Image: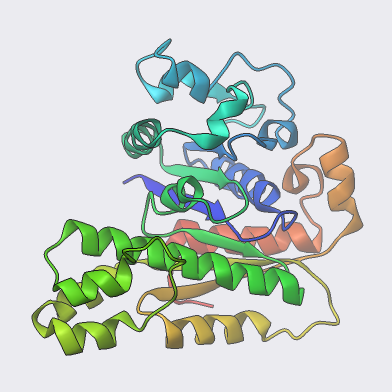
Amino acid sequence: MTQIYPIGGGKGGVGKSFITANLGALLAKWGKKVVLIDLDLGGSNLHTLLGINHQKGGINRFLDKTVKNLGDTAVSTFIQNLSFIGSSLCSMEVANLLHAHKLKIINAIQKLSFDYILLDLGTGTNFNTLDFFLTSNQGIFICTPEPTAIENSFRFIKAVYLRKLKQIVKRQFFNSAVKKAIIPQNHEAMTSPDVIEIMLKHDPDREKFLRNSLSEFKFKFILNQFRKNLDVTMGDKIEDLCNRHFYSNFQFLGTVGYDVRIHDSVLSKKIFTHRYPYTPPAMDMKKIAEKIINNRPWDH
């Protein structure tokens, strides 16, 4: 069964592409058929981390109908079982993707035949990024331990959550009061209402349906660039906070330690876990990849 993991976060520079490349390489090394898709449209750089210097096109060829199937744009990497679909040759306007093109990409991703599909997303909370993150029900948030990064991650989580609420309410029959609370009529900024309380008040018959819909999401997160002097329980505390304030499940996958050699691997266009397989950050990522591959959702 294909597993799709969108990888995103609220702040730039937290290591989304780095984590994507290394997790993909580890899964492939263990015999899984993996494809990495660069969906940081307008700012793609995943190909650089993979050491791919010359591209023949990727998502652009699928959108302009040069190829019929998105899978036909996948290219091999130097790691066996690891393929890549890029977006660096797309036009600059691709950052403002048409709704129809976005749906076309999402539908095509869901039809790909790989064991694991990792989506490297851009920064921010625009609708395209949020909808790509919602391609599957098990997205991974990447965050660093700094207060600003944690704050931006919570903002991203809330944006994803509200986007999903809006999609559910629009597609299903709900009381008008519920729709007004979740889908503002005057284009004002959406807030984070306690939608379950609103449901209990205005549409109790649909409350269970909404709870079940939200509980299908198993969000995960990783703390990257973690230093030894920090609180080792930080990830567990964030997990507990999210699980108390949302109706979806959140799982802390683990930390990835800070190491100056990571910068060296990026400059040399080498996969860190391949170049430095026995360093602490590489071992951290192996533990995270093992959790993913063994599907142990609540095992810390």
The answer to whether residue 242 is left or right of residue 271 is: left
Query: Closer to the camera, 78 or 174?
Result: 174
The answer to whether residue 230 is left or right of residue 122 is: right
**In the image, residue 115 lies at what x, y percent?**
41, 42
**Numbered disc total:** 0
Residue 246 in the image: above or below residue 283: below
Q: Residue at x 86, y 60 (%)?
A: 259
**In the image, residue 112 lies at what x, y percent?**
36, 33
Which quadrant of the structure image shows residue 80? Answer: top right
The answer to whether residue 218 is left or right of residue 152 is: left
Which quadrant of the structure image shows residue 100? Answer: top left
Residue 47 in the image: above or below residue 171: above
The way the protein has been coloured in the rendering is rainbow
Looking at the image, the residue that sits furthest to the top is 66
Query: Closer to the camera, 290 or 156?
Result: 156
Query: Closer to the camera, 181 or 284?
Result: 181
**In the image, residue 118 lies at what x, y percent?**
51, 45
Q: Residue at x 56, y 35 (%)?
A: 95
Q: Residue at x 40, y 75 (%)?
A: 249
- The quarter in which the C terminus is drawn is bottom right
Which quadrant of the structure image shows residue 195? Answer: bottom left
Looking at the image, the residue that sits furthest to the front is 186
The answer to whether residue 88 is left or right of residue 203 is: right
